Amino acid sequence: MPAIRVSALPARLVRMVEDLRRKEDRLALLLSLVIGALVGLVVVAFILLTGRLTALMYPAGGSGWRRIAVPTIGSLVTGYLLFRYFPLARGSGIPQTRAALFIHDGRISIRSVVGKFVCCSISLATGIPLGREGPSVYIGSGLASVIARRLGLSRAQVRSLIPVGGAAALAAAFNTPIAAVLFSLEEIVGDLHAPVLGSVVLASAASWMVLHLVLGDNPLFHVPSYHLVSAAELGVYVVLGIVGGLTSVTFVKLLLWLRARFAKMPRASLWIQPVAGGLTVGILGYFAPQVLGVGYDQVERVLNGDVILKVVVVLAILKIIATSVAYASGNAGGIFGPSLFIGAMVGAAVGSVAHMAFPGSTAGPGAYALVGMGAAFAGIIRTPFTSVVMIFEVTRDYTIIVPLMISNLIAFYISQKLQKEPIYDALARQDGLHLPTRTSRTQGSVPLVSSASRDAPESLTPEMKISEAAERVKDNVLESWPVADELGLVGMVRTRHIVHAEEQGKLEMTIERLMQIARRSDGDKSVDLPHVHNDQPLSRALARMRENGHKVLPVVSRANARIMLGIVTYADILKAFGVESADDLDYKDHPDL
């Protein structure tokens, strides 16, 4: 009898797993707890490893040359690893996490997870001034993806676990379980009411518990209690919000500009590019050691009132430069931590000036450093809810919450006005990824392009003669045709332009030449590649048609805008909205259509 029971155990386990698969809700909750605990352990290992390596790289009383040599050598090592083995491990990992969610059906390879862990550990330990939080989100999401795919879950289930792993990772990396939930929903998913809310909360709580069991119950920063000294002090926090917003915009624009410059360099130089960041950091760190690493120890000193005005101003400027060059050149690491450092220095600078001018009615510089952290985070990362809750959680001080909300709101508003595209969207676009905006991710039941798209016709080529193209488009109702070369889609050409060229006897003219002439003669924008994506609302397709006058638009991949998945026509959109004929519409406001 015992032998029978033992042999029946595997069959029972199989039945239990299959039963859980059929009951998706139970499986999601169970996996959330498992993923949360596992991710928590991995992130704790990440924290401990980088801490031990940093102590080894920079021993007490070490020579000044280390501050130049170590980050330079570290960036050389990681540059080679990133180029040769782990190309997806560059940068912070947040854009890549969102790309996995919205483009790659939740797929993140275990190789990329290992690469992110190894390369970020080396970068952070050698003093590269980037953060661990963004990479942790990618690692956590990657582990969730790997587990879900190994269990044979559906694509929808795999995608739903990406924000679960991300929240668990951030909860452990920052010791902020509530802010981790908000960030995962606000930034990664783009919907605070997402159905995965319960799973995200469970994973965040499980990861946070693991962190506390291993490393104890300590906030990220130990801060004395601050309070609002007088109502007039709110005016200073308004000024801090303005300065924080302008600083955020400066940092984001500099980072994006530098990254665009590095992207234009030959691909063969990718392995050596990170050294430019490491060497820059080393030179700056030689004169100002506080610039090295993420700098949380310096932030804590400033939060506790250890502030010299000239020093914090210089550190803010140097940190902006060092972080921008390090990130833009391709080193592995995030911008969460640097954002807090920059914000703390800017806040301390504003607070020092205010306290010198109005010593009786303002708090010390430490209070402004605390609020400055939130303002910079709101301006750079663009997650206003997360930034307020996060500052509260990392300091566990509620008394400064109202000034924090005021400064955050102002910094967020200024950042939106002066830098239209959020930093993670801009970084993804530079990588050729067209991620859905926050607005499009919350469209709900709005009809999408996918509901009206059809298979694309055979594309014309830029070298094709008018004679051949005219034969191809003859007797076809399409009013525009896609043009593609060996690398993919290059634009759209109007059928009427082809017919008109044929009537004029320009049979030897190429399609490429025709598109150039059309653009010059009547402002045609066909070579600007008008397009839409499958997950965009049909109203967006109509707006695009209005912008460029085409009644046919290519539907392209978000991973590469030159990969055409199909087309959508004006007539098909009308049918999707229940309108059988365009004659039923009033065209007086739409002359281009």
Image (cartoon, grey):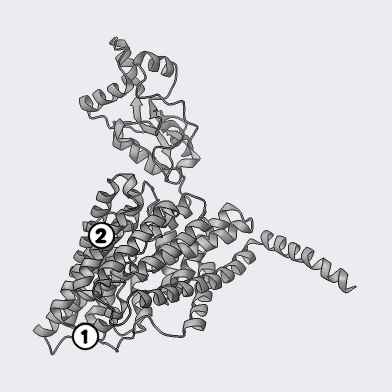
Q: Residues within 10 Å of mark 1 (few under 14, many from 20)?
A: some
- Say which quarter of the image contains residue 95: bottom left
- Mark 2 sits on what residue? 325
In primary-sequence order, the first of circles 2 and 1 is: 1
- Tell me whether circle 2 and circle 1 mark residues in contact (CB < 8 Å): no
Marking on residue 306: 1
Residue at the farthest left position: 357
- Work out how far the residue at label 2 is from the one at label 1, CA to CA, in angstroms: 28 Å
Q: Residue 116: percent from the left, percent from the top? A: 44, 61
Dividing the picture into quadrants, the one containing residue 295 is bottom left
Q: Determine whether the residue tagged by mark 2 lies in a helix, strand or loop.
A: helix
Q: Is 279 drawn above or below residue 443 in the view shown?
A: below
Task: Say which of 384 and 171 sits in front.
Answer: 171
Percent x, y for residue 184?
A: 44, 65
| Marker count (numbered) | 2
Q: Quadrant of the N terminus?
A: bottom right
- Can residue 43 be seen in the rendering of this structure? yes
Q: Is residue 263 above or below residue 292?
A: above
Residue drawn at the location 54% of the way across and 62% of the way down: 144
Residue 90 at what x, y percent from top left? 38, 57
Quarter of the view holding residue 542: top left
Nearest the viewer among 402 and 274 is 274
Judged left or right of residue 195, residue 16 is right
> What's the residue type where badge 2 is placed?
Val
**Amino acid beneath label 1:** Asp
Q: Quadrant of the C terminus?
A: top left
